[in-house]
Amino acid sequence: MERFFACGASNVSSDITFTDYPTAADTAKRGRLQIIAVANQKGGVGKTTTAINLATGLSATGKQVCVLDLDPQGNASTGLGINKQSRIVTSYDVLMGQASAKGAMVATQIPGLTVIPASVDLSGSEIELVDAEKREYMLRDVLRGKLDDIDYVLIDCPPGLGLLSLNALVAADSVLVPLQCEFLALEGLSHLLKTIERIKHALNPELTLMGIVLTMFDQRNILSKSVASDVRAYFGDQVYDTIIPRNVRVSEAPSHGLPVLLYDHRSTGAQAYIHLAREILNRERGSVSRQEQKTMKALG
Ligand SMILES: Nc1ncnc2c1ncn2[C@@H]1O[C@H](COP(=O)(O)OP(=O)(O)OP(=O)(O)O)[C@@H](O)[C@H]1O
Ligand SMILES: [Mg+2]
């Protein structure tokens, strides 16, 4: 078993470099809104679950948050209680420039949290966009500078690295990568990080890796523990301290149209997402104060 880990880990490119967490200067430059792509080309690793529950955790702290469902499966919309009949203006319309992001936002049961729902129309958009001019910038153009009263837009990306995910990564300030603690997790991560690095160089120089969050961690499973320690060994503090455990309440919540934080806020899964939201906010504050300290030092 250990040989497999060593094998997966050795494939991780050591030349991947990212800028540190966003600094105060970055934050000031881009204003209040932060666009975060929740991405991993691998299916079923917890992207949607993380987008929904982190968004809920951030709204609970008083932030204005929007989940942009960019997956034709529409799981984030369903998980936030938006039934198919209510998805009138959707992320497809926004992406195609046929509706404004503001106009597509639907309120959820959580104060401060809206969703731009997805419809199956999105599945055709990859083909429709192929001939579009600036096809990688479609989402960026309709989001940037247009949502001044929102703190965070969390884009729930589909699996794969097609044109939809590419649009999300070009529109985003940063990428949050949910990583399931399972066999060969590191190989998939290596591929994703190389893609992010390429996008950063070619299409979106401001893109940063926000962090990696370990999901569906099973305390009793030796594989889970080994993956977690391998990922930490390679990526250090780019991996959040908070680990999301595998928890049945997390998987039940979407069928009730609720984030687990509302479905069962005492569950280990809900508590972990509250921790993650707190850790993300603390890191942001930390990076701001680190920058302030540097500025103070420079000023003598
Ligand atoms: N911490 C957890 N504990 C238990 N089940 C979980 C947990 N996180 C996610 N799941 C379940 O695992 C499945 C996949 O999760 P999710 O839909 O969030 O992944 P995804 O990466 O968005 O998938 P896709 O690539 O298909 O969009 C879902 O059924 C979800 O309810
Ligand atoms: Mg999903």
Image (cartoon, rainbow, N blue to C red):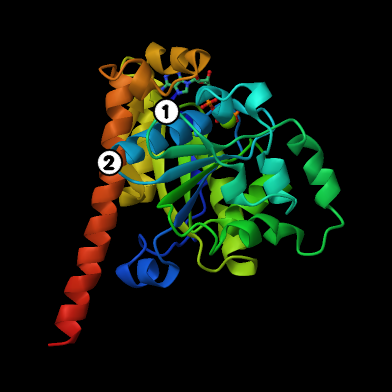
* Residue 20 horizontal/vertical position (percent): 36, 62
Please indicate whether residue 125 sits to the left or right of residue 148 in the image.
right
Q: Which residue is mark 2?
A: 61
Most foreground residue, 258 or 223:
258
* Residue 219 horizontal/vertical position (percent): 31, 19
Which residue is located at x 23 percent, y 50 percent?
282
Q: Residue furthest right?
A: 131
Most foreground residue, 42 or 113:
113
Please indicate whether residue 180 sits to the left or right of residue 70 in the image.
left
- Which is in the foreground here, disc 2 or disc 1? 2
**Labels 2 and 1: the sequence-earlier one:** 1
Please tell me whether residue 236 is drawn above or below residue 224 in the rendered image: below
* Residue 106 horizontal/vertical position (percent): 55, 36
The crowding category of the residue bearing disc 2, from other C-alpha atoms within 10 Å (few below 14, some 14 to 19, many at least 20), is: few
Res. 24 image quadrant: bottom left
Q: Secondary structure at mark 2?
A: loop
Please tell me whether residue 37 is drawn above or below residue 287 in the rendered image: above
Q: Looking at the image, in which quadrant does ligand 2 appear?
A: top right
Q: Which residue is mark 1?
A: 2
